[in-house]
Image (spheres, rainbow, N blue to C red):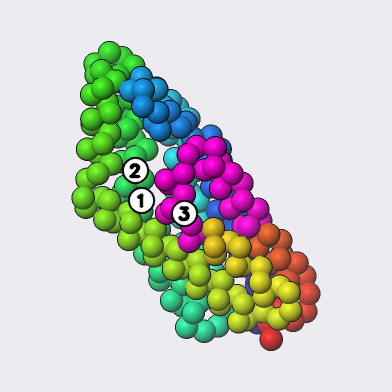
Amino acid sequence: MPRSDLRRLVAPAVGAGLSMALYLGLRPYGDQSDDPVQVAEAFASVAWVGSHLGGMAALASVGRLALRTADLLPGALARAGRWSGLAGAVLVMPYYGAETFSLHVIGRQAAAGALSPEEVVVLAEQIRSEPVAMSLFGAGLVLLAVAGVLVGAAWHRSLAGPRRWAAWPLAVMVALVLPQYYLPGPLRVVFGVVFALAALGLAATALGAGRRAHPLR
């Protein structure tokens, strides 16, 4: 396999990292407040929609990274990672869509005076706790976590030397996407930065490997 093929991993890795950092860095965290007014203002913000679109792009890019890894690296690990990543990316999108657009709509309604902030909090809880959406979202995040680990293992088995470890930091960060939702805002911002660094590290390694002669053992 030509080493230059590994450069095809650069775009999805960079996309995942930068999108996650933008999502968690720009996201309003007023919804973590006990003040209903701050919750409604966060939902109504344009940054709410823009940042959550970045979150969707990040998780879709993880799925794409798993797909590209299976195209380039041999073995059952990479193939399993492809299907896990694609299925996970698909399953998280309905919940993210509701989180992004439905909460924004009710926030705007509060800003227009059609809903009280207290009503926004009640509606938001109902939207977020809808059983089918929550189940799909949880299953999707678990599948993405599995895909991250499988991509890390496939990369580790296929490359030689120190470069074989390059995918593991991102694999760990993908596996931690689910628990990071329970962190306070500042720590979620830090998570986004570390996620981006892990993804950019993998991209740099893939790019460097593409400039040499023999990427695989």
Q: Is 110 located above or below residue 147 in the figure?
A: above
The residue singled out by tag 2 in the image is: 97
Q: Is there CB contact under 8 Å for labels 2 and 1?
A: yes
Residue furthest bottom as drawn: 217
> Which of these two is toward me, 140 or 89?
140
Contact (CB < 8 A) between labels 3 and 2?
A: no
How far is the residue under mark 3 from the one under mark 2?
A: 17 Å
Question: Which residue is at the far right?
Answer: 212
The magenta stretch spans which residues?
A: 174-200
User: Element under label 1?
Assistant: helix
One can see residue 30 in this view: yes
Marks 1, 3: nearer the viewer: 3
101 on left or right of 75:
left
Report crowding for label 3: few under 14, some 14 to 19, many 20 or more residues within 10 A (C-alpha).
Answer: many
Q: Circle 1 is placed at which residue position?
A: 93
* Amino acid type for the residue under numbered disc 3: Val
Q: Find out whether the residues at labels 1 and 3 contact each other: C-beta distance under 8 Å.
A: no
